[in-house]
Image (tube, rainbow, N blue to C red):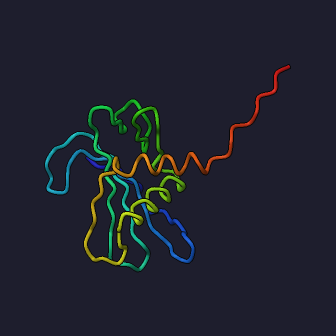
Amino acid sequence: MTRSSRKPRRLVVGDETFLWAVAHNHRDEQGRLRECRETLRLRRSGARGRLLIVFQKRPGRLVPDGYVHSGAVGTGGLWLNLHEPGTVRALLDEATRRGWDSDDPRTSHLDGWDLFTEAATRLTAAAPPPAEQVRP
């Protein structure tokens, strides 16, 4: 079973455009049945390379399984929403920092949990501070 966005979304980074989609499935690339996993698929428009960032369900690592919404991945009290462009950008930046080349013709597979903490930290640092609550 695979659920994915029907049409890839666009993410513009500088003068480059990336296409991305989120999928939920239970089988790996060889067709073997696995635990739930959420996959973020990315490619730069016009480039040959593909990137699959896979968040596999395992102890302490949560992916959508009926209790959380599509695109939600979390661990240690931190959550990312893979349907948010800011999250996609943070994961793309981290994958690129670690050497992903969008022009390499091979499809690269990365364990999303290896990128999770850095992406969540980047998003938290970029978030505006919460509004101060006014008491009557």
Residue 40 visible in the current orientation? yes
- Residue 135 drawn at (x, y percent): 82, 22
The quarter of the picture where residue 29 lies is: bottom left
Residue 7 visible in the current orientation? no
Residue at (39% x, 69% y) in the render = 43
- Residue 78 drawn at (x, y percent): 46, 37
Name the residue nearer the viewer: 111 or 117. Answer: 117
Q: Determine whether 106 is above or below 9 in the image.
A: below
Q: Residue furthest top?
A: 136
The answer to whether 134 appears left or right of 2 in the picture is: right
- Residue 49 drawn at (x, y percent): 32, 73
The quarter of the picture where residue 8 lies is: bottom left
Label total for image: 0
- Residue 40 drawn at (x, y percent): 37, 55
Q: Considering the image in quadrants, where does the C terminus appear?
A: top right
The answer to whether 1 appears left or right of 123 in the picture is: left
Q: Determine whether 136 is above or below 106 in the image.
A: above
Residue at (34% x, 52% y) in the render = 39
Name the residue nearer the viewer: 107 or 75. Answer: 75
Residue at (49% x, 56% y) in the render = 90
Name the residue nearer the viewer: 102 or 32. Answer: 102
Residue at (39% x, 53% y) in the render = 22
Q: Residue furthest right?
A: 136
